[in-house]
Image (spheres, helix red, strand yellow):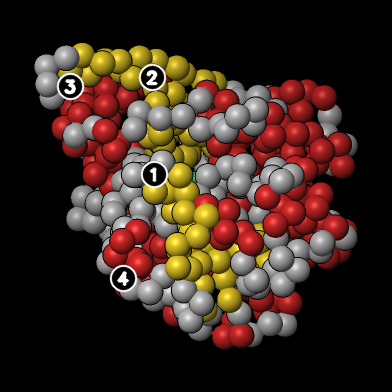
Amino acid sequence: MSTEGFNPFKMAQQQFDAVAKKLNLDQATCDLLRFPEREYQFNIPIRMDNGTYRVFRGFRVQHNDARGPAKGGIRFHPNETIDTVRALAMWMTWKTAVVDIPLGGGKGGVVCDPHELTLHEQEQICRGWVRQIVRNVGPLQDVPAPDVMTNSQHMIWMLDEYEKITGIKAPGFITGKPLGLGGSLGRTEATGYGVMYTVREALKHLGIDIKNTTASFQGFGNVSQYALDLYTQMGGTAIAVSTWDPKEKRAITFRKKTGISFQELIGITNKFGEIDKEKAKDLGYEILDGTAWIEQEVDILVPAALENQINKDTVQLIKPSVKIIAEGANGPTTPEADEVLKAKKIHVIPDFLCNAGGVTCSYFEQVQSNMNYYWTKEEVLQKLDQKMTSAYHSVLDLAIKKNEYMRDAAYMIAITRVADAVRLRGWV
Ligand code: GLU
């Protein structure tokens, strides 16, 4: 899903290289960790509803499975590329390591635009994806989950195809399943809530009362929706949200300076997280440019859309009022922008820590699926809060102790854990 001239895999490697150097990591470990262990690319031929055939390109990258089965979502996006999937798989390895769950890192994708596909066609893509990769994924090998433009319906189609082919019931093969079919309570909320658990801790660290804060969000998909919901429940005031306008094919920002009501906004949002512009105007929202979300005079920015959103150009638009950037998206900030944020002393909660709530709850879902015994929502969210809070504090403590930028401290913890695992296994 790379934008012009931007290569997310190069960025992920650049971030890794910088920290590997600080850690004095040996050459073989670096060589092992800066590339995926395995990757698969394949065709998915589909009979469309009008009787014609189309071939979609599918990917699965397993970056590292030293700490447990590879784990990570599957994205449906027209601009998906192998390098995007490689980067995201690598970030999954650091994500599962920083929250210390027994899983590795993987990611998958299909080049397609669900806006233009019927549900039946999407089902064929899901089933076709599983048929192509069935030998190389599974509860003990590699466990997919939802991501950009995929949801629990896609996951259950994939699980069903997997179970049909293997002839067994294997609910641990996939996470983000529907409730009642192996899904976990709290999984839908988990990523967004996890973002806000880390924001709550960051505000405590900075000595700021959440009730006196304002925030601006980029994106209004699964992550941003629940992050905004919990933020307002905790007493914060959300004033802006930017989303994709499918009609004009550009991003736009919705602003309400008196504070956005989650219930009101969700009522005019479609399943892709796109907000109805006309209805928003009627409800008193100002409609601004796509980049306006980053230019708001707020305390907290929550980029929760795609990668490469805070880059060397847009970083200049950030107002001095901003104290925290909570990265709900994967890879939203480029290394050039990081240098500016460091200089401005903004407290960045890095992506693979900030948005780890999703995969942490996926892990809980696997545990419940394997036991075939399901916890209450309170139990799930309480365990999630505990995991996220403790991971945040481990990173913060190291950042303070070594005077490191939060992203680098998170990388130091994650890379050390994975490097120890590959060494203990005798791989390098
Ligand atoms: N797609 C989510 C992520 O990027 C969740 C992955 C998972 O649950 O495995 O973290």
Q: Which residue was labeled with disc 4?
A: 282
At x 79%, y 34%, the residue is: 17
Helix, strand or loop at label 3? It is: loop
Residue ID for mark 2? 57
Q: Answer with mark 2 or mark 3, whichever residue precedes in sequence.
A: 3
- 183 displayed left or right of 214: left
User: Can see residue 319?
Assistant: yes
Q: CA distance from mark 1 to mark 2?
A: 27 Å
**Numbered disc in front, either 1 or 3:** 1
* Callout 1: CB less than 8 Å from ligand 1: no
N-terminal of the pair, mark 2 or mark 4, is 2
SS class of the residue under badge 4?
helix
**Residue type (three-letter) at the residue carrying disc 3:** Met
Q: Nearer the viewer, residue 58 or 159?
A: 58
Q: Is mark 4 within 8 Å of ligand 1?
A: no
What kind of residue is marked 4?
Asp
The location of residue 82, given as percent across then percent down, is 52, 23
Q: Nearer the viewer, residue 356 or 109?
A: 109
Earlier-in-chain disc, 3 versus 4: 3
Q: Is residue 205 above or below residue 147?
A: below
Residue 248 tag number: 1
Q: Position of residue 237 (x, y in %)?
A: 52, 78
Q: Is residue 48 above or below residue 2?
A: above
Q: Quadrant of the C terminus?
A: top right
Relative to 52, 271 lies left or right = right
Q: Nearer the viewer, mark 2 or mark 4?
A: 4
Kindly report the distance in space between the C-alpha atoms of the residues bearing marks 1 and 3: 27 Å
- What amino acid type should be assigned to the residue bearing mark 2? Arg
Q: Nearer the viewer, residue 92 or 244?
A: 244
Mark 4 or mark 1: which comes first in sequence? 1
Q: Which residue is mark 3?
A: 48
